[in-house]
Amino acid sequence: MKRRDSRCLIPSALADSRHFSIADSTVTKLKQDAPSLKFQTRQVLRTRPLVAIDIDNAAKSYAGKRVLDGVSMRIDKGEFVAILGPSGCGKTTLLRLLAGFEKLDDGSIALGGVEVSNKHFTLPPEKRNVGIVFQNYALWPHMSVGDNVGYALKIAGVGSSERKRKSLDALDAVGMRDLSERAPADLSGGQRQRVALARCLAANPSVMLLDEPLANLDVHLRASMEKEFLGFHKRTGATMLYITHDQSEAMALADRIAVMDKGRLVQFARPHELYREPRDEMVARFIGNGLILPASSIAAASQPGQVMAEVFGTPHRVRAPLSGRAGAQLSVHPNDLALANDDGEGFSATVERVVYRGSHNQVDFHPDAMPELSLTLHAPLDRAVAPGHAISVRIDDGWVIPAAA
Ligand SMILES: Nc1ncnc2c1ncn2[C@@H]1O[C@H](COP(=O)(O)OP(=O)(O)OP(=O)(O)O)[C@@H](O)[C@H]1O
Ligand SMILES: [Mg+2]
């Protein structure tokens, strides 16, 4: 069968990346795939080479400025990992290094145990069997939806009837089969993103990299697309790396979350661990509307892992690492704070604002000992509170983190 060398799937004018391609092995596998999606999915799960990603001490600078600084992580086969961090922290740079669009200054990257990048060598993108979904979808405007999805197969020399069938199967998987003749311009943002996913599915990569794929969509569409991604992951079994700066998206989707800040990996853990045991103030603030309270006089409590910490002059039982911490702050969330009875168990504060949230009232308040600090708790609807009221606040749970650097 006819083969061509060029596998450039995305026009440079459209894509943030320079190129997008699939490997020969993928094409060969696609040719073996079964006609129906159900069968194709089973085939994919059975035959796809499951691939772990090993990033070891990756470093990258642009014009002398360090953008990635010694990032190391291992992503397991078939794992769904979110890379989370503020704008400019190096998320896209890491993804471009994984895809092979950029060269490493130092360290190494291995896919499926095979080193694909180090400071001397960069395996080109088309040899990596990696699929990418961009924020801007990067569809060709002059091609129909079906042709966009099937283009990789066309370039690979797959015959037209087989190509059509595989494209329709991929579109079926994202609920877009009926729109295969449409032009991308005549689709909504969510539909375009589904087409981009179908294109990835048709190419059948072992590793999928997604760079803020929902950033252009409204809140409702985001929620339904989150389900789409989870279904997609379950169906394909691909190792997925999903970049976002939206912590709730990361929490909803990922097996594990890598939190980055200023080019460094700060913490790589399961969502509940990041929420309950953030490593430092940056992670604590980033996850779950985290709040930081000053804490002092940390003393061991009766149970291991628990300590008594003084916050605004009142002792509270909270959790701390077994190694203990000297200078300290307390990481809490609005759900960890509660209105106390007036029997001295809480610290005193003044209500600033009360917002009705349906299931509860959101109460914004200032501790009297530190009026410049703004905090939030969730109060039951039957507790009468109003701006200006004096309240007493209980801390039901908290995690001791190091003092601010
Ligand atoms: N080709 C380049 N040349 C010079 N500087 C670059 C280049 N690419 C990225 N940078 C810089 O590297 C830093 C990290 O950029 P990167 O795009 O990886 O951030 P990000 O975490 O993806 O941010 P965002 O959430 O805004 O997309 C930024 O300061 C950026 O300006
Ligand atoms: Mg980015």
Image (cartoon, rainbow, N blue to C red):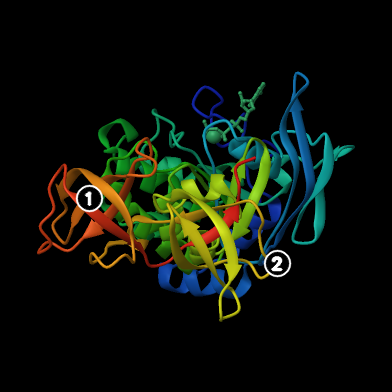
Answer yes or no: disc 2 within 8 Å of ligand 1.
no
The picture places residue 372, in percent across and down from the top left corner, at 37, 35
Residues under numbered marks 1 and 2 in contact, where contact means CB atoms less than 8 Å apart? no
Q: Residue at x 66, y 70 (%)?
A: 322
Q: Which mark is residue 404?
A: none
Quickly name the residue at label 2. 323
Q: Please indicate whether residue 47 sits to the left or right of residue 175 in the image.
A: right
Q: Is residue 79 visible?
A: no
The residue lying toward the viewer, choosing from 81 and 374, is 374
Q: Please indicate whether residue 357 sits to the left or right of residue 80 in the image.
A: left
* Dot 1 or dot 2, earlier in sequence: 2
The residue lying toward the viewer, choosing from 20 and 54, is 54
Q: Residue at x 75, y 28 (%)?
A: 61
The picture places residue 113, in percent across and down from the top left corner, at 80, 61
Answer yes or no: disc 1 within 8 Å of ligand 1.
no
Q: Please indicate whether residue 278 sits to the left or right of residue 360 in the image.
A: right
- Outermost residue on the right side: it is 120
The picture places residue 268, in percent across and down from the top left corner, at 62, 57
**Vertical comparison of 342 with 155: above or below:** below
Quickly name the residue at label 1. 363
> Dot 2 surroundings within 10 Å: few (below 14), some, or many (20 or more)?
few
**Vertical comparison of 372 with 302: above or below:** above
**What distance separates the C-alpha of mark 1 from that of mark 2?**
35 Å
> Dot 1 surroundings within 10 Å: few (below 14), some, or many (20 or more)?
many
Q: Secondary structure at mark 2?
A: loop
